[in-house]
Amino acid sequence: MGKYYIMANNHLTQWHRAYIKNAYRELEQGTTRKQLDALNIKATGKNVLDVGCGPGNHLVILSKHSPKLLVGVDIDERFLTIGRSRMGKLIRPSSTKPSLINASLPTLPFADKSFDLVTCFLVMPHVPDDKEALSELARVLKIGGTLAISGHGLGFPLRYLKRFRIKPLQMYLASIIYRLTGKKIIRNTLQNDKKICRILKNIGLTVDVLRHNKRVLGCVSTYWIGATKMDTKSETNPKATQ
């Protein structure tokens, strides 16, 4: 692991380093735990999947719940390598050890209805298609299971106008193009959380929790959603429950 950790660390961009630093700062400050608690997430004895796990800060907290199975996936192998090293030092021997896999939306390498809990935080702004990504998350979720997601609203870039300069304009441009064409030509789009909730409803999930951590000029900065997968067959065929 030491050799691969050094290789991954040497290939980290400035963005990677800032992201990892912020993720573990939030973990240390208790922000990560508060995010999970706000969505009433319970992982004890469950099969749990964290999609877009990054360096693993959410997995550290989820491991303490003693889930039956804990899996993290991310598209960036550098995050996974750093995560394996960092989590190895933070997760107690008595806690559930997570497995890390290189994978991404919209195609996850798992069978239908494999997990009781699926988390996917701050990934939605980057997926090619919202409905396709959410449908894939729902596919691997068991009936009655929980999907917890988060993303950025229109107020998010307003917090960073001075720091990022052009980046907020790119995010707004990406969002406008997506709304007009239905295509994410530029990634890191901003989303209307109500639209995300409508998609969830259309694919068979019921929204239980909708929270906004902050508003800027009246616009949502970041949204957090917890939803339950319903048995749509039973709903469309009343005789199935008789």
Image (tube, grey):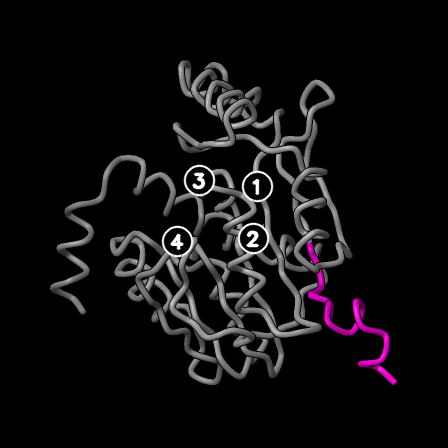
Magenta residues span: 226-242
Location of residue 219 by image quarter: top right
Residue type marked 3: His
Q: Nearer the viewer, mark 4 or mark 2?
A: 2
User: Crowding near pointer 3: few (<14 within 10 Å), some, many (20+)?
Assistant: some
Distance from disc 3 to disc 1, alpha carbons, whole Å, reads 9 Å
Indicate the position of residue 110 as horizontal and vertical percent values.
43, 72
Q: Which residue is mark 4?
A: 54
- The residue sitting at 34% across, 71% down in the picture is 88
Q: What SS does tag 3 mark? A: helix
Q: Nearer the viewer, mark 3 or mark 4?
A: 3
Left or right: 46 in relation to 205: left
The answer to whether mark 3 and mark 2 are in CB contact below 8 A is no
User: Crowding near pointer 2: few (<14 within 10 Å), some, many (20+)?
Assistant: many
Looking at marks 3 and 4 on the same chain, the residue that comes earlier in the sequence is marked by 4
The answer to whether mark 4 and mark 2 are in CB contact below 8 A is no
Distance from disc 3 to disc 2, alpha carbons, whole Å, reads 12 Å
Looking at marks 4 and 2 on the same chain, the residue that comes earlier in the sequence is marked by 4
Q: What SS does tag 1 mark? A: strand
Left or right: 94 in relation to 42: left
Q: Nearer the viewer, mark 1 or mark 4?
A: 1
The mark found on residue 151 in the picture is 1
User: Crowding near pointer 1: few (<14 within 10 Å), some, many (20+)?
Assistant: many
Residue type marked 2: Leu
Looking at marks 1 and 2 on the same chain, the residue that comes earlier in the sequence is marked by 2
